[in-house]
Image: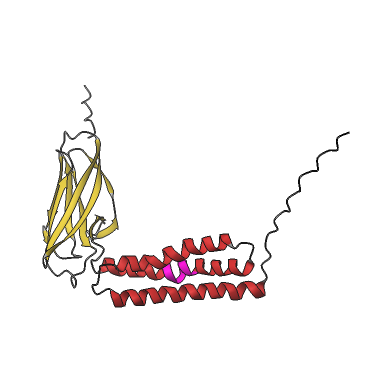
Amino acid sequence: MTPAPPAPPTPEPQEFPTFRLNSFVPAFLLGWGLGVALTFMVRGVGSALLGGPCEGRTVVALLVPLLLGPGGLAFTAANWRRPRRAALGLGLVLASLLPALYVGAQDIGGLRRTGCAGGYVVVSRLDSAGQAGGSVSRVSLVAGTSQELTARVGGYTPQTHPGVFTVLAQGSAPGIHATVTPDRVRAGQPFRLTVSADPGAPVNTYTVGVSARTPQGEKTAEAAGTIEIDVRPAPQATPPTP
């Protein structure tokens, strides 16, 4: 009788690593501390090497979070059976969020306030007192009517861009009109935006574009914004009762 072939060896189940508090916390804090040090080191080196206020600043702000976040997760996954190294990787991941991502978001916000990230036009509704309310991106309009909104040039400040912006507004189709008053404003100064639809305008969704430009040295600073107009049919007149 031919002997039965030996059974294949059964693979040993992989045990989930045990994280002990006395070894996890120091390694975790070490990873977080290394991430903090790298964050401020890169910001310091970037500030020293970049002469201009705008060029390259966005890369410096996002470089460390993009390195520490995916890099820390990959390091943790590769060393998940080694508790101390895994804890070190988790510390790097935390550092990618706080302070790296938080500081980077603050830096990018500063770039927008100084005009380095470009400009934009914010469109808002008017409240009952005629003041600007919350910003809107879409309004509904009955054919044959108009609506007054308010807008302003954002992304720039009067200190960084003291010139006057020339504002233009235009509908995306015939029968959709947009006018601005006044058409020359400074950064942050509100102006009226009136949108209207002709009585025969087809029911559809249209776009009104608003742009603003001002000379800035040898260049031109620009800002733009859009708002969608939902045109609804005019109510039908009720025939007189005989």
The answer to whether residue 114 of the structure is visible from this angle is yes
Residue 213, position as x, y percentages in the image? 14, 59
Prevailing SS of the magenta stretch? helix
Q: Residue furthest top?
A: 242
Residue 96, position as x, y percentages in the image? 46, 67
The answer to whether residue 232 of the structure is visible from this angle is no
Compared with 12, 84 (above or below) is: below
Q: Is residue 63 left or right of residue 240?
A: right
The color scheme shown is secondary structure
Measuring 86% from the left and 38% from the top, which residue is drawn there? 3
Measuring 81% from the left and 43% from the top, which residue is drawn there? 6
| Residue range corresponding to the magenta coloring | 95-101
Residue 224, position as x, y percentages in the image? 20, 55
Name the one closer to the observer, 183 or 223: 223
Quadrant location of the C terminus?
top left
Q: Is residue 122 left or right of residue 61?
A: left
Q: Is residue 152 left or right of residue 10?
A: left
